[in-house]
C-alpha cells in the first residue's frame, strides 16, 4: 500500500530538492542585491500573499482531493468555480490592505503587483488537485520547477533589481508555467462543461469547504502574517528580514512531511482497508526523519545562514535553532490533521484554528517586545505543539 505513495513522495522530494536549491540561490542573490530593509519588505509582502492565497484556496484543494477520490466530478466543477470566486475576493481584500495599512508605505506599488499572483496560484492549485488524486505528482513537480527556473534565469542576468521588478517577473514566470501546466493536464482531465456555473453545486461546495477555509485562513494568519506584521510594527524591517530568512528555512524543513502526507491522503480518504496500519507506519517514518533533522539543524545552523545570506543575517541563526523544534510537532501534526480531515473533521479544524490564532496573537504581542524575533520563534513552536495536541484529541474522538 505504501509503494506508490512513497514513490510519489520521493518524486516530490527530489523535485523539491531542486526547487530548494533554486530557491536558496535566489534568496542568496536577493539578500545581497536588495538591502536588508528591502528584503524585510519583500518578506512582509510574501507573508501577506500567503494569507490571501489561503483565502483564495478556502480549503478547496484538500476537500477537492477527497471528493475527486470519491468520484464526484460535478462537485469538482464546483471546486473550480469556487476557487475562481474566492481568488477575486482575495485580490480585492489584498488591495484594500495594501492601500490601508501603513506597514506597506513606500512600496505599495510593488505589493499591488504581487497580488496579481493570487489568481494565477489558484489556477495552479486546481491542476495540483487533478494530479494529486491520480497520484501523478511528478507532473506537478515538473511544472513547479519551471516557475522558479524562469525567475532565477532573469535574476542571474540582471544586476540592478527592485522590489517591483522582482514581483513583476514572478507574475510573468507563473503565467508561462501555467500555460505549460494546462497543456499537460488536458491528457489527464477533461474540462468539458467547465464554462457553465451550477449555482446549486457552488453553494453545496461552499457549505462543505468553509470550515477548512476558515481553518486555513486562521493558520495562514498565525503561520506568517501575524508575526511578520508585529515584528515590523514593534521592531522594524531589518528584524522582519532576519526572522523571514529563518522562517523560510523552517518552511523548507517541513516540506517532506507535507509531501508524504499529501501522497497518502487519497488512500486515507478512500475505502481501502489497512488505513490504521498505514497511519502508524507513516508516523514512525515521520518521527525518525524529524529527529535526524533537528540534530542536523542545531549543528549546521550558523553555516546554513552564512552560506544562504551572508554575515548580515547572523540573528537568524538563533531563530532557526528555535524553530526547528517546531518541526517535531508539525511533522506529526500533518499526519494527524490530514487523517482528521479524511474522516470529515474539517469542522473540528475550525475550532483548532480559532484557538491557535488567539494564542498566536496574544503570545506574539507579549513576547516580541520583550524577546524580539526569538520570542516570535518560541510562539511558533508553542502553536505547533498546541495544534498537535488538539488534533490528536479530536481524532481520537472521531475513532471512538
Image (cartoon, grey):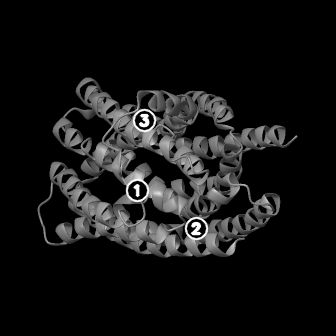
Which of the image's four quarters has the C terminus? top right
Tell me where residue 267 appears, x and y as whole percent: 67, 59
Q: Left or right: where does residue 222 sit relative to residue 30?
A: right
Q: Which of 57 and 318 is in front in this view?
A: 57
Mark 2, Cα crowd under 10 Å, few <14 / some 14-19 / many 20+, is many
Q: What element carries label 1?
A: helix
Tell me where residue 157 appears, x and y as whole percent: 14, 72
Q: Left or right: where does residue 169 sit relative to residue 247?
A: left
Q: Nearer the viewer, residue 152 or 280?
A: 280
Mark 1, Cα crowd under 10 Å, few <14 / some 14-19 / many 20+, is many
Residue matched to label 3: 55
Which of the image's four quarters has the N terminus? bottom right
Q: Residue at x 12, y 67 (%)?
A: 159
Going from N to C along the chain, the mark reached first, 2 or 1, is: 1
Residue matched to label 2: 297
Check whether the beta carbons of the residues at disc 2 and disc 1 lie within 8 A of each other: no
Q: Quadrant of residue 148?
A: bottom left
- The span from disc 3 to disc 2 (Cα, nearest Å) is 32 Å
Give the farthest residue toward the right.
Answer: 400
Mark closer to the observer (2, 1)? 1
Q: Nearer the viewer, residue 304 or 122?
A: 122
Q: Which mark is residue 273?
A: none
Q: Is mark 3 on a helix, strand or loop?
A: helix
Mark closer to the observer (3, 2)? 3
Residue matched to label 1: 127
Q: Which residue is drawn at 62% across and 57% down?
A: 266
Amino acid at each position: 500500500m505504501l509503494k506508490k505513495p512513497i514513490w510519489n513522495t520521493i518524486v516530490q522530494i527530489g523535485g523539491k530538492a531542486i526547487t530548494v536549491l533554486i530557491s536558496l540561490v535566489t534568496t542568496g542573490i536577493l539578500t545581497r542585491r536588495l538591502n536588508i530593509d528591502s528584503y524585510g519588505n519583500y518578506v512582509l509582502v510574501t507573508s501577506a500573499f500567503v494569507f490571501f492565497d489561503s483565502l483564495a484556496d478556502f480549503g478547496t484543494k484538500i476537500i477537492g482531493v477527497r471528493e475527486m477520490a470519491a468520484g464526484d466530478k460535478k462537485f469538482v466543477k464546483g471546486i473550480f468555480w469556487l476557487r475562481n470566486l474566492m481568488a477575486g475576493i482575495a485580490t480585492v481584500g489584498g488591495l484594500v490592505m495594501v492601500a490601508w495599512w501603513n506597514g506597506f508605505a513606500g512600496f505599495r506599488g510593488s505589493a499591488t503587483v504581487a497580488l496579481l499572483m493570487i489568481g494565477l496560484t489558484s489556477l495552479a492549485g486546481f491542476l495540483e488537485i487533478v494530479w494529486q488524486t491520480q497520484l501523478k505528482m511528478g507532473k506537478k513537480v515538473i511544472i513547479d520547477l519551471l516557475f522558479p527556473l524562469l525567475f532565477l534565469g532573469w535574476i542571474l542576468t540582471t544586476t540592478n533589481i527592485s522590489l517591483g521588478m522582482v514581483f513583476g517577473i514572478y507574475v510573468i514566470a507563473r503565467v508561462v508555467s501555467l500555460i505549460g501546466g494546462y497543456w499537460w493536464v488536458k491528457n489527464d482531465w477533461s474540462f468539458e462543461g467547465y464554462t457553465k456555473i451550477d449555482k446549486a453545486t457552488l453553494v453545496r461546495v461552499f457549505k462543505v469547504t468553509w470550515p477548512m477555509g476558515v481553518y486555513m485562513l486562521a493558520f495562514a494568519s498565525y503561520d506568517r502574517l501575524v508575526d511578520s506584521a508585529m515584528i515590523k510594527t514593534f521592531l522594524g524591517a531589518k528584524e522582519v528580514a532576519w526572522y523571514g530568512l529563518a522562517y523560510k528555512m523552517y518552511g523548507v524543513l517541513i516540506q517532506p512531511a507535507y509531501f508524504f502526507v499529501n501522497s497518502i491522503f487519497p488512500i486515507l480518504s478512500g475505502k481501502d482497508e489497512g488505513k490504521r496500519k498505514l497511519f502508524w507506519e507513516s508516523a514512525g517514518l515521520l518521527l525518525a526523519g524529524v529527529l535526524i533533522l533537528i540534530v542536523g539543524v542545531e549543528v549546521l545552523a550558523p553555516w546554513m545562514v552564512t552560506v544562504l545570506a551572508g554575515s548580515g543575517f547572523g540573528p537568524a541563526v538563533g531563530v532557526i535553532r528555535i524553530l526547528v523544534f517546531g518541526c517535531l510537532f508539525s511533522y506529526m501534526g500533518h499526519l494527524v490533521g490530514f487523517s482528521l480531515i479524511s474522516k470529515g473533521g474539517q469542522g473540528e479544524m475550525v475550532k483548532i484554528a480559532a484557538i491557535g490564532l488567539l494564542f498566536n496573537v496574544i503570545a506574539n504581542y507579549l513576547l516580541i517586545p520583550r524577546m524580539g524575533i526569538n520570542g516570535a520563534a518560541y510562539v511558533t513552536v508553542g502553536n505547533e505543539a498546541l495544534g498537535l495536541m488538539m488534533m490528536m484529541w479530536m481524532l481520537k474522538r472521531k475513532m471512538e
